[in-house]
Image (spheres, grey):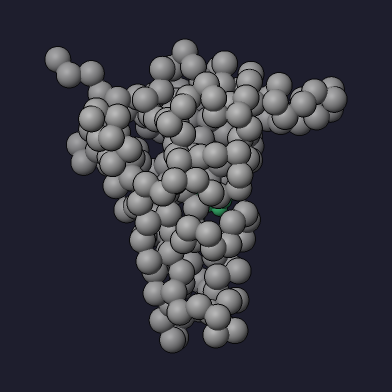
Amino acid sequence: MNVLPNLVVMISGSGSNLQAILDATAGGRLPAEVVLVVSNRQAAYGLVRAERAGVPTLYFPLKPYTAADRSREEYDADLAGHIAPYRPDLVVLAGWMHVLSPAFLNQFPNRVINLHPALPGAFPGTQAIERAFAAYRRGEISHGGCMVHYAIPEVDAGPVVAQAVVPVEPDDTLESFAARLHAAEHRLIVEAIGLALDRQEQ
Ligand code: GAR
């Protein structure tokens, strides 16, 4: 019997990309299993999606660490310690809104990938879609996009696994552009997980 690769998915919000991953694994399009979903926000709807799919969840907030004057490195090391027993082949940051330090990343070398709603080098950080759309309005860019890259201790940077261009249409509103971009992300994250897992086999 073939054992499926283990995915740990980390989220902070709605979890629509987590849902795309869960749908792809359940439908057999992505031969892998989500073994744990981690959130740093208790209200993240992605936790509900995980529970509905019968996937174990971990809510692990930063606040108790900052309140006790404990460092980000301690938080990151403890977080890695909670995840390690699940033996992830890949840790997928799907809307996880914290930069992870080497205290985390070094525990899973070449195994942490991050989804970002902009092309490599463009609009790192939060509100990337809003900033891309504003740049389009100013005539600075003709398209946006999304990417999945290996995580490094820099915001939304690192070796690219896969990317997709999303054109801005002349009659686009921020909402219609964002909807097309999110749909592209839902395809890209599944494709990128497959690519990253394939590379591990080689
Ligand atoms: C996605 O658009 C993802 O690219 C973005 O958060 C959203 C999460 O949506 N990530 C970043 O901006 C990382 N800098 P979701 O919770 O519905 O999957």
Mark yes or no: residue 20 visible: no
Residue 197, percent across and down? 29, 33
Total marks drawn?
Answer: 0
Q: Residue at x 60, y 47 (%)?
A: 155
Q: Classify residue 88 by image quadrant.
A: top left
Against 160, residue 118 (above or below) is: below
- The C terminus appears in which quarter of the rendering? top left
Residue 13, percent across and down? 56, 45
- The N terminus appears in which quarter of the rendering? top left
Mark yes or no: residue 57 visible: yes
Task: Say which of 96 and 202 sits in front.
Answer: 202
Q: Residue at x 60, y 76 (%)?
A: 134
Q: Classify residue 122 by image quadrant.
A: bottom right
Q: Is residue 167 left or right of residue 128?
A: left
Q: Is residue 134 left or right of residue 196?
A: right
Against 34, residue 93 (above or below) is: below
Q: Residue at x 84, y 22 (%)?
A: 68
Q: Residue furthest left?
A: 1
Q: Is residue 200 left or right of residue 166?
A: left
Residue 14, percent across and down? 52, 47
Q: Residue at x 25, y 35 (%)?
A: 198
Task: Say which of 4 and 73 sits in front.
Answer: 73
Task: Say which of 148 and 169 sits in front.
Answer: 148
Q: Is residue 192 left or right of residue 126?
A: left
Residue 184, percent across and down? 36, 60
Task: Say which of 126 and 52 sits in front.
Answer: 126
